[in-house]
Amino acid sequence: MVATEQNRFRNFTWKQFKKNKPAFFSLYVLTFIAVIALLAPLLANDRPLYVKYRGEKFFPAFSWNKLIEVKTDSGAEVINSTAVDWKQMKLDDVVWAPVVYSPGKSDYANSNFVSPRSEQKFLKDGKLISMPSRFCHWLGTGSRGDDLIAGLIHGARISLTIGFISMFIATLIGIIIGILAGYFGDDQLLISRGKLFAIMIGILIAWFYGFQIRSNMLAAGLHNQSGGFLFQLLMSILIFSAILILFFQLGKLMERLPWLNKTFLLPADTILSRVIEIFVSLPIFLLIITIAAISTPSLINVMIIIGLTNWTGIARLTRAEMLRIRKLEYIQSAQALGFTSWRIMLRHALPNAFAPALISISFGVANAILIESSLSFIGIGVPPTITTWGSLISEGRENLHAWWMIVFPGLCILITVLAYNLIGEGLRDALDPKLKN
């Protein structure tokens, strides 16, 4: 009966969301941006997708080995696929990416901010000629001649990655804190001293071994285009969870000691609500700038910083929903059947309490993209070698006549953030109980 009611509510929610035309259209826009971000190496790459050279066929854009060996009559020719200028080579056949430039790669013949309508030059056989249409910089170049379209395409990948992963971190923290505060309240969490001490120590040790020691592996995985970062992040989460479970079991053993065996009522809702209020009262953006300025510039640090400071909205919504759900009949029935609190929370309560948090997550992703763009704009957070939408705008700020360096990245940020906000508003309207009634 409960499952049938849940399915009806989901169908109703989806129908209500589809009725919101701006939100539903924004879903298509974000899907389009996500596809561009996913296919960025195929859409903008200075290495050809396919090459036939001296009778041999190669796929430089897909090759993990930077050195390509070509057999010749006089021996073997070794080509460094990342350093050689493929546009200057005499190739038998070639298939280029739609944009024949990579982000951050300099085209010195068109350096110092060449506008989209200006005359562009191409170096061929040591001479500067008019740019062939296939190699044009259609949206202009930056100070070093780096192509703007390539920067926008790969910048979408960085922005979406930071938005999703930082909010994944924030969601984990917010859901855990919200469900604990809402389900247990101030009158249901009985815990022994042994378990409490073991869990507090276990969290610190789990963080150290799960994330701190593995920071280099996480950083290396982020630069791996085969999904290495997600694998390393999953490994860190598994290590963190395993250590925490181990210390929880250790706490049970510690309960055998008389002093550690004493139980007391822990006011979980009051404690966690005060923690949420402390974070809400902080000037979050100034805190992010301060931490980013004193930490090592890296994408991982930016994602962690944003994730650790943007979980409060998710926690408050989850807590409020859990306070309502824990009094419903099916939760009381599960308690009467003797199910453990963790099973009731994770299997029965959380699926019904998570829906309102989706609204905060949607707005949070948009906020994370804005924060990353702001940090890149002021030159902190991400390394200078990584091209982001914010770094492109920052480069254009130094030369205001280069309007294309400000307008096009600004439009990308505007469209992406607006799409997430419209989806958030669509979810808020679709989940409104007044519409359901």
Image: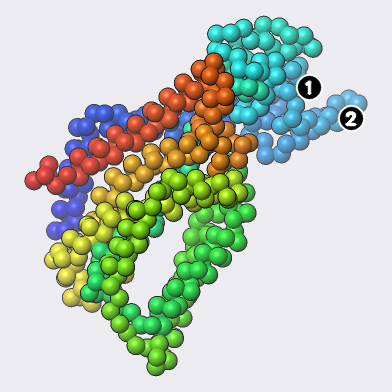
Residue 246 placement (x, y as % from top left)? 48, 75
Visible residue check, residue 6: yes
Q: Specify the quadrant of the image occupied by residue 386.
A: top right
Residue 215 placement (x, y as % from top left)? 59, 55
Identified by mark 2, the residue type is Gly
- Say which residue appears at 37% left-offset and 88% top-offset: 261
SS for dot 2: strand
Residue, far right: 74
Visible residue check, residue 180: no
Q: Nearer the viewer, residue 174 or 242?
A: 174
Count of picture labels:
2
On the image, numbered disc 1 is attached to which residue? Answer: 54
10 Å crowding of disc 1: few (<14), some (14-19), many (20+): few
Compute the Cα span from label 2 to label 1.
13 Å
On the image, numbered disc 2 is attached to which residue? Answer: 75
10 Å crowding of disc 2: few (<14), some (14-19), many (20+): few
- Say which residue appears at 22% left-offset and 57% top-offset: 321
Q: How is the image coloured?
A: rainbow
**Left or right: residue 54 compared with residue 301:** right
**Left or right: residue 194 compared with residue 43:** left
Residue, far left: 437
Do the numbered discs 2 and 1 sit on residues whose CB atoms are within 8 Å?
Answer: no
- Say which residue appears at 39% left-offset and 93% top-offset: 258
Identified by mark 1, the residue type is Arg
